[in-house]
Amino acid sequence: MIDRLSFARVAANLGVTWHTVDNAVLDAGRVLLIDNPGRMNGVRAIGVDEHRWRHARRGEKFVTVIIDLTPVRESTGPARLLDMVQGCSKLVFKSWLEQTRQDLP
């Protein structure tokens, strides 16, 4: 996200591999977004979509992306990322919702 550079460009500028940048971004995202105890505050509308990770060579190539649509519905700002869960099925979302339900208003 820094200066809208691709992972490949950031990696080249830092002299590291693409995977090193990817791991750093995922770790930072987990700390800033996923592990944030207040991330569910005010959530009243959830959006769900599946995304294919084209760069994945092994394992699950799909993730379920869960976003807070409340700001969009209330015209107060853009949607915000709540979570990304490996896999793409009704069961993946249902499991996420059951695990997260206690954090929802």
Image: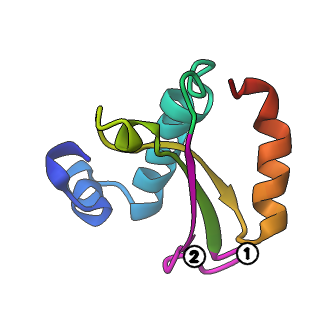
The magenta-colored residue range is: 45-61
Instruction: Specify whether 19 is left or right of 88.
Output: left
Q: Residue furthest left?
A: 3
Say few, some or many: other residues with alpha carbon within 10 Å of mark 1 (under 14 / 14 to 19 / 20 or more). few
Screen quadrant of the C terminus: top right
- Contact between marks 2 and 1 (CB within 8 A): the answer is yes
Q: Quadrant of residue 82?
A: top right
Residue 76, image x and y in percent?
29, 32
Of helix, strand and loop, which one carries label 1?
loop
Q: Is residue 98 above or below residue 104?
A: below
Residue 49, image x and y in percent?
56, 66
The residue under label 2 is which amino acid type? Ala
Q: Residue at x 39, y 61 (%)?
A: 17
Instruction: Find residue 56 and name its label.
Output: 2
Who is closer to the viewer here, 74 or 62?
Answer: 74
Q: Is residue 51 above or below residue 20?
A: below
